[in-house]
């Protein structure tokens, strides 16, 4: 739109009164509406990209009422049907430390929630646990980004990397999930309530009538002016925190975990050197897959270290320990005979010192306080935030990478969802840690089965059918009846432009529709989707150039390339990768055929350009489609005195003039050097 306004040849826009349809034929009304539009809009953008849609508004209670409008568009936005089934892949982490994580694929209804995922995963023979012994998490960049509720819809799963962590069987110590189905009304009682717009929110009763049949609801988080009066018999109430958009979710109530225990997230971490730094030349890096332990709130430090060490035994091979050694780190230094390794240890000690005295001397302090017969594991646990980068206990201006957990028998005070970083000893990592085993994941048989199934797809015709479906509107003013009445609105494609831009409406308010829309690359015929009264002569392009044909001309030119003016070929696609909350755009475009090369498709991903096969151009990530009409040569929108030279080759005189202009550095009308100007 901004480019159109810059190129608009109409400077003084007149006031235009658009006439009513008043029962007249479509062609007559369309001609008037398009001419009114052209009085204010004339540019190359209009001639290239603007088409016309027919909008019909009808009232079932007043069949004689007539309201038709013909409006321009520069991009045709088509709704996309939601997929009936969704394919989701999750990772299951077992409580047994010697059992690697398992990847499982499922095909579920798009209306399902993560509760269904837990139930289906729990039924798998290789897993076979209660759904209440599976905790849902969103794992991002080697750390737990958030704990997920089982009420989350699968439509939101495209922004989550779902992991399920097995919870130990605590037996009778666990409380069963309580179902709050009490629907008795009282002052101050909370419910999930549907408002007048059809949305569910948390609310409580602030007033009741004498007969206790009408209640006034105050919605949580909204001003009192939005309070609504509801009848207790209406189906607008549900138990609190069940379906409301702002419901409060208690993750602990969804798993079998005693009140005396908490879930603790473990992330692997190491220090990396950085070229540019402020206070310390090292920064922490989180790697591998996060783990989770379920421990008492006041667990002793030594017991916590022992549990973490057991969790890591699958991908570590500890060296032989001396019977009376004081520290695991001492045994590593004794085993290493080379001078380089000792220097490395000293350098690491210095790095820890730069980070802070408290952190730098953590190993020595722990070794001093540890019992003689209890060797330390080859790591230090530190209290960090969920990203695993900084301390969760110290202020930000301390620039602390974490608060060390002392290796003593003193009891800790851990909170629910606390994250601990496992700072590995660098020598131990290099010699005794199997990184391949650390990152390994076992694929369940369902993964190959789901991948072997053909990807479900719909034809673009289904999108056009949804586009032309009648929309029910509650109340619209009817001029013939002089009052507001229920109405129906229908939109149809009346005229297609030379360059048709199709926008697939995938991104909705809270989720993205991932349906694969199959569309032809060549010979896309738009005639089945045009309104029945559409006429090729009544279009923005024809009326803009004054080329509307008379009746005798139509008969003489009836046989001229009638099919090509309705056939379109795809020449570019914009793909969206990600979710409704964020993503990345990548473009596919087709090169022009020349004497030296054939038409090829290229992928434009930021600064990277690569070739792409034609069969891979249309995917389920397609967001915008660009079509060019076959009979369009690209010069029709230019003024006649320029377009007439399109098919004529350059003469020797023309070539000489261009050569002299290049040598002289002449500038063209846009102010650029002629040899650098894309217009020339």
Image (spheres, grey):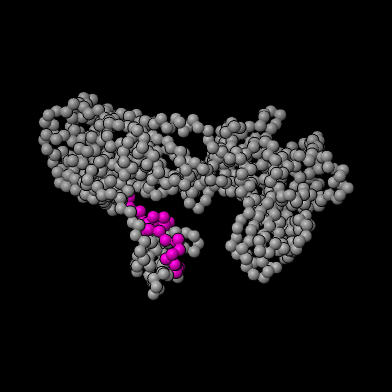
Task: Find residue 5 and report its horizontal and vertical position in percent.
Answer: 67, 56
Left or right for 207, reference 332: right
| Nearest to the observer: residue 545 or residue 253 | 253
* Residue drawn at the location 61% of the way across and 32% of the way down: 614
Q: Who's the residue at 60% across and 58% down the image?
A: 472
As drawn, 649 above or below 279: above
In the rendered image of this protein, does residue 548 appear above or below residue 93? below
For the record, the magenta segment spans 226-251
Q: Main secondary structure of the magenta part?
A: loop
Q: Which of 516 and 179 is in front in this view?
A: 179
Task: Report the side of 478 relative to 238 (left or right).
Answer: right
Does residue 264 appear in the picture of this structure? Answer: yes
Q: Residue at point 32% right, 48% down?
A: 254
Q: In this view, does 207 lie above or below 606?
A: below
Image coordinates for residue 51, horizontal then vertical, percent: 70, 50
Q: Residue at x 66, y 42 (%)?
A: 627
Dividing the image into 4 quarters, which one contains the N terminus? Answer: bottom right
User: What number of labels is visible?
Assistant: 0
> Which of 665/292 is in front?
292
Q: Is residue 247 one of those drawn in magenta?
A: yes
Q: Assess whether residue 135 is covered by the magenta stretch.
A: no
Quarter holding residue 237: bottom left
Q: Position of residue 557 (x, y in %)?
A: 84, 42
Location of the C terminus by quadrant is: top right
Residue 469's spot in the image, x, y percent?
A: 63, 51
């Amino acid at each position: 739109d901004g480019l159109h306004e810059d190129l608009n040849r109409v400077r003084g826009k007149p006031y235009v009164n658009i006439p009513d349809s008043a029962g007249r034929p479509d062609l007559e009304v369309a001609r008037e509406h398009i001419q009114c539009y052209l009085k204010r809009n004339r540019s190359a953008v209009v001639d290239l990209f603007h088409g016309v849609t027919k909008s019909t508004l009808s009232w079932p209670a007043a069949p004689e009422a007539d309201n038709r409008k013909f409006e321009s568009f520069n991009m045709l936005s088509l709704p996309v049907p939601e997929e009936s089934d969704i394919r989701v892949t999750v990772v299951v982490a077992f409580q047994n430390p010697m059992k690697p994580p398992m990847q499982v694929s499922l095909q579920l209804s798009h209306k399902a929630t993560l509760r269904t995922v837990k139930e289906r995963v729990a039924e798998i023979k290789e897993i076979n646990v209660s759904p209440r012994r599976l905790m849902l998490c969103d794992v991002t960049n080697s750390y737990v980004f958030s704990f997920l509720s089982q009420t989350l819809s699968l439509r939101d799963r495209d922004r989550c990397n779902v992991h399920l962590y097995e919870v130990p069987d605590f037996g009778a110590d666990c409380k069963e999930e309580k179902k709050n189905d009490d629907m008795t009304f009282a002052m101050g009682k909370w419910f999930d309530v549907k408002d007048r717009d059809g949305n569910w929110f948390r609310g409580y009763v602030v007033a009741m009538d004498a007969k206790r049949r009408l209640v006034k609801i105050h919605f949580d988080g909204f001003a009192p002016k939005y309070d609504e009066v509801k009848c207790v018999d209406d189906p607008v109430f549900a138990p609190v925190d069940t379906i409301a958009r702002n419901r409060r979710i208690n993750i602990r109530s969804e798993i079998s975990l005693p009140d005396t225990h908490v879930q603790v997230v473990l992330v692997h971490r190491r220090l990396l050197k950085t070229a540019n730094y402020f206070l310390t030349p090292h920064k922490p890096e989180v790697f591998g897959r996060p783990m989770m332990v379920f421990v008492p709130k006041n667990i002793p430090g030594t017991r916590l270290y022992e549990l973490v060490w057991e969790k890591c035994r699958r991908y570590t091979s500890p060296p032989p320990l001396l019977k009376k050694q004081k520290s695991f780190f001492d045994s590593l230094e004794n085993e290493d005979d080379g001078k380089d390794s000792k220097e490395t240890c000293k350098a690491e000690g210095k790095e820890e010192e730069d980070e802070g005295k408290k952190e730098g001397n953590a190993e020595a302090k722990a070794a001093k306080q540890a019992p003689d017969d209890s060797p330390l594991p080859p790591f230090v646990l530190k209290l960090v935030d969920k990203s695993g980068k900084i301390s969760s206990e110290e202020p930000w201006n301390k620039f602390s990478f974490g608060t060390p957990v002392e290796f003593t028998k003193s009891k800790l005070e851990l909170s629910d969802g606390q994250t601990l970083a496992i700072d590995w000893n660098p020598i131990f990592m290099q010699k005794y840690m199997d990184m391949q085993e650390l990152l390994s994941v076992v694929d369940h048989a369902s993964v190959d089965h789901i991948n072997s199934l053909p990807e479900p797809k719909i034809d673009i015709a289904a999108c056009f059918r949804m586009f032309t479906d009648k929309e029910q509107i509650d109340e619209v003013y009817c001029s013939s009846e002089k009052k507001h009445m229920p109405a129906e609105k229908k939109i149809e494609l009346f005229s297609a432009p030379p360059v048709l831009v199709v926008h697939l409406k995938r991104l909705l308010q809270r989720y993205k529709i991932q349906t694969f829309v199959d569309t032809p690359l060549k010979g896309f015929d738009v005639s089945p989707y045009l309104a029945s009264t559409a006429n090729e002569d009544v279009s923005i392009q024809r009326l803009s150039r004054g080329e509307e044909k008379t009746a005798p001309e139509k008969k003489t030119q009836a046989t001229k390339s009638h099919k090509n003016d309705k056939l379109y070929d795809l020449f570019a696609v914009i793909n969206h990768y990600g979710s409704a909350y964020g993503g990345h755009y990548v473009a596919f475009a087709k090169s022009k055929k020349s004497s030296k090369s054939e038409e090829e498709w290229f992928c434009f991903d930021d600064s990277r350009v690569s070739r792409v096969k034609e069969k891979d151009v249309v995917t389920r990530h397609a967001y915008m489609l660009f079509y060019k009409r076959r009979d369009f040569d690209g010069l029709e929108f230019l003024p006649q005195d320029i377009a007439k030279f399109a098919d004529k080759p350059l003469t020797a005189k023309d070539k000489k003039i261009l050569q002299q202009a290049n040598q002289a550095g002449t500038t063209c009308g846009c102010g650029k050097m002629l040899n650098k100007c894309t217009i020339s």
